[in-house]
Image (cartoon, rainbow, N blue to C red):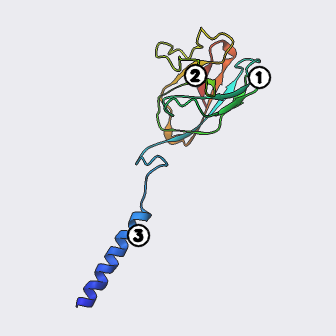
Amino acid sequence: MKKNMIKTMGTVLCACFLSLFAVSCADVNGLHNQSAAQVTFVFENMGDSISGNYTIPGNFNDWDNSVTLVTLEKGNGTSEAITVSKSNIQFTLLQTGDSGWLRTWYPDVKGNAADTGTAGAPYQNFYIDGLDLSAGEITILIDGSTGNAIPKVQ
């Protein structure tokens, strides 16, 4: 009887140990049960003179402007896919590492508008409500040909 009890306890302990590694629902940030989508930003018609490395700081990446996420060539470019876990996002477009532009998503500029103090630059603030994070992959088209770029979720 003692041998059977030891075998049973050993089996139970082994099963518990293995279940720790087999069951996990965390994403790469360690968050459980969180919906997230891979978002690609497509910028079009932002201006023929606008080329170079740009970043997309926003409330989905702690406003980090240090990493190049899109290279624009004559005002056009497509970002790499970015993990977004917020359905309502605020973001801006600016040159990578630019610390001279201090208006990254200023709350009073909610109309997806360009910063009037930076004429000729692509610095614009954007706000998008209600992204469907269960979609998995989302493309956001930002067409600057109308003066103020208008984001469209595709």
- Residue 126 image point, x, y percent: 55, 21
Tell me the residue at 37%/69% (across/down).
17
Q: Mark 3 to mark 2: distance in Å?
A: 49 Å
- Residue 141 image point, x, y percent: 64, 27
Are there few (<14), some (14-19), or many (20+) residues within 10 Å of tag 2? Answer: few
Tell me the residue at 48%/38% (across/down).
85
Q: Quadrant of residue 143?
A: top right
Say what secondary structure mark 3 lies in.
helix
Could you say which disc has been placed on residue 74 in the image? 1
- Residue 92 image point, x, y percent: 57, 23
Q: Which numbered disc, 3 or 2, marks the residue that appears first in the sequence?
A: 3
The amino acid on which the numbered mark 1 sits, given as a three-letter code, is Lys
Q: Which residue is mark 3?
A: 18
Could you say which disc has been placed on residue 99 in the image? 2
Tell me the residue at 46%/46% (across/down).
29
The amino acid on which the numbered mark 3 sits, given as a three-letter code, is Leu
Specify the quadrant that holds the C terminus.
Answer: top right
